[in-house]
Amino acid sequence: ISHESVAEAAGTTMEQILGRKHRKSAIDALALGGARILDDLYRKGMVCGALAVGGGTGTHIAATMMRVLPIGLPKVIISTVVSRDVSPIVRHKDITLVHAVADIAGLNFMSRKILADGALAVMAMVDNAFEASGDHKVIALTSYGPLNQCAEFTSKELEKLGYEVVPFHAVGSGTMAMEDLVGQGLIDGVLDLSLHELVDALYDGYCKHIGDERYETPGRKGIPHVILPGGLDMIAFECESLDGVPERLRSRKFLSHDFRSFVRTTAEDMRRVADILAEKLNRSPRPATVIIPLKGWSKADGVGAPFYDPAANEAFVNQLKKSAHGNVVIKEVDAHINDPACAAYTAAELHALMQKVL
Amino acid sequence: ISHESVAEAAGTTMEQILGRKHRKSAIDALALGGARILDDLYRKGMVCGALAVGGGTGTHIAATMMRVLPIGLPKVIISTVVSRDVSPIVRHKDITLVHAVADIAGLNFMSRKILADGALAVMAMVDNAFEASGDHKVIALTSYGPLNQCAEFTSKELEKLGYEVVPFHAVGSGTMAMEDLVGQGLIDGVLDLSLHELVDALYDGYCKHIGDERYETPGRKGIPHVILPGGLDMIAFECESLDGVPERLRSRKFLSHDFRSFVRTTAEDMRRVADILAEKLNRSPRPATVIIPLKGWSKADGVGAPFYDPAANEAFVNQLKKSAHGNVVIKEVDAHINDPACAAYTAAELHALMQKVL
């Protein structure tokens, strides 16, 4: 594959790319062209794995290209820049990073070992087939620390009903992997126990890194989608004291957790979040079910707990009822989100929807 | 291996560990105990590879343990926390990171794939022997961007003389991998083209992340060590403009590079660096050779170049002569560091020292 054809795939020419003033803009054009060519080869069934070697620039280009490939298709990058922040490289994908240790420049005892390690690893992964769960229907479950009991109880209920549960951390990039797998058709139903990422996205909080497609893929794929408002009572910040919280929020109820702290959300926040969610679900060709636990939405939100505020929570429900255009079924359960009763109710609701699909 | 024996290896007991107030201190004790047990098993010849699975805490403990193993011995961590800053996990070691994508909690189609990928990768790496270069003597070469030509010319000269050259980036962690490999006995001679890390360490600059053993391992292992003062003319900061430079340095000569900027060092800096280097080399049982290129020490330091300051450079040489106790041989070459003449001279000097070893 020539430089020229990569440039052409990016809708430009090598001449134009070489004339660009900014190195980054030239690199990004080639990465885009490369990604399009790789995507095309994959769609033609010609790709069973991806292997790349690079320094800073090469790793950036390789990762941009590899991210067009589905999760489960082996991706290995041998890179000199592994000992740093690799979130822009990996994002939510299953990219394996092999640290080059020495510079990649010619063959020597070190590079021979590392280059062979990377090649052997990707070959072994290609031989290890990625297969959807044959007999069991798969439920993707997204949860969040202050809902751990909810996740545990609900998983057990679903497993008793014969489902395979795949858990994801609803703290940003984790759930984007879930949306990706739903898009790939590998998930049969989605149980979003947490909407917490939506409030963090509003306030630049700890779990803000969700993509535009968050909460939308299940509807688009036409699979059952059950949602609980877990964690909507709190905005999370990566700080140990009130000083780390944005100034305008410092008069609110505050809770120190570990390296993170929580701030209580207001009725106004709830209305904004309800509108965002309704807009997302209204686009769906298939209704989603939102289950409201009436006695609190996280470990911090319940009778006697520091963030207990039923009026604020009610604002969410009322606004959702107003903004959702018939594509949202709202159900209520007289329990706390972490109660076994909530788990049983939720699992039964999802199971009923799954039965209809069958 | 029981919890109790891990605690014992860390010089404590599980009772004491469970009684600690800070979670981190308990985790660190267990990681230390685990590392000691792993090191012991490795020394007994019982370890050919390491594989771990973890979330945040598990990855921290696994990496702490694995870092006691030598470079070249396969190390793979399947982790939920790959999409972030992994420098505290990887450091300068050859640790391969497999991104778990979903949470690690029970077996499902996703975890089965990823867990098997990691296991297969480490098995493939174990089968791929890490061998020192049999016929060729190995020279580790450390370089730095503004000395690229020096590195290129010197490598070619050394390869012509029959050496295998393993290049390392002298920008912090890269050279610590080199010191590690020297300690493992895999390197026959060291050519440090750059001393730049020393000035960055003084000023909290971009390449500051060197360990205490930097520049000391070759002497301790008794192998030839040739050093050039490459990059001593500049302190590097990760910023694009003067605003990113510490205030007290803003009146100095300034140069914008890419995402990094450079500030000229003074005669006073040179004297401090010479003392630090002399102290390190004085400890050595074997003399090191320092070659001084008289016409400049980086792309920015030469006749007509922005950082040209022969008086400052001379301060380094004079101070080194004063502080070094006979364990440093200082040679001068009438060339710029990036000139082919400097490369030829340097390669010949190192070759002569290597001949003596033979």
Image: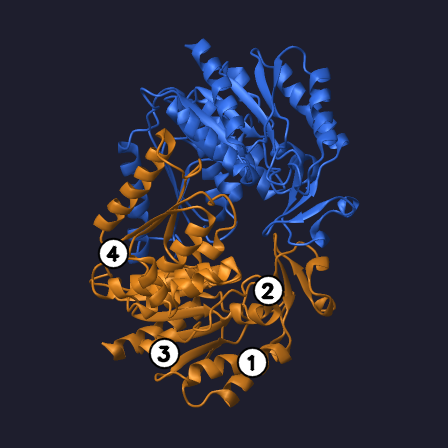
Chain colours: A blue, B orange
Q: Chain of mark 3?
A: B
Q: Quarter holding the C terminus of chain B?
A: bottom left
The residue that mark 4 highlights is B130
Q: Earlier in the sequence, mark 4 or mark 3?
A: 4
Q: Earlier in the sequence, mark 3 or mark 1?
A: 3
Q: Earlier in the sequence, mark 2 or mark 4?
A: 4
Q: Which mark is residue B205?
A: 2
Left-right relation of B354 to A315: left
Q: Earlier in the sequence, mark 1 or mark 4?
A: 4
State how many labels appear: 4
Judging depth in this view, the residue of A150 and B105 nearest the camera is A150
Residue kind at label 1, given as amino acid type: Phe
**Residue A35 in view here:** no
C-alpha gap between disc 3 and disc 1: 21 Å
Q: Chain of mark 4?
A: B
Residue kind at label 4, given as amino acid type: Phe
Q: Are marks 2 and 4 in contact (CB under 8 Å)?
A: no
The residue that mark 1 highlights is B316
Residue kind at label 3, given as amino acid type: Gly
Left-right relation of B320 to A330: left
Residue drawn at x 54%, y 67% as measured from the top left: B231
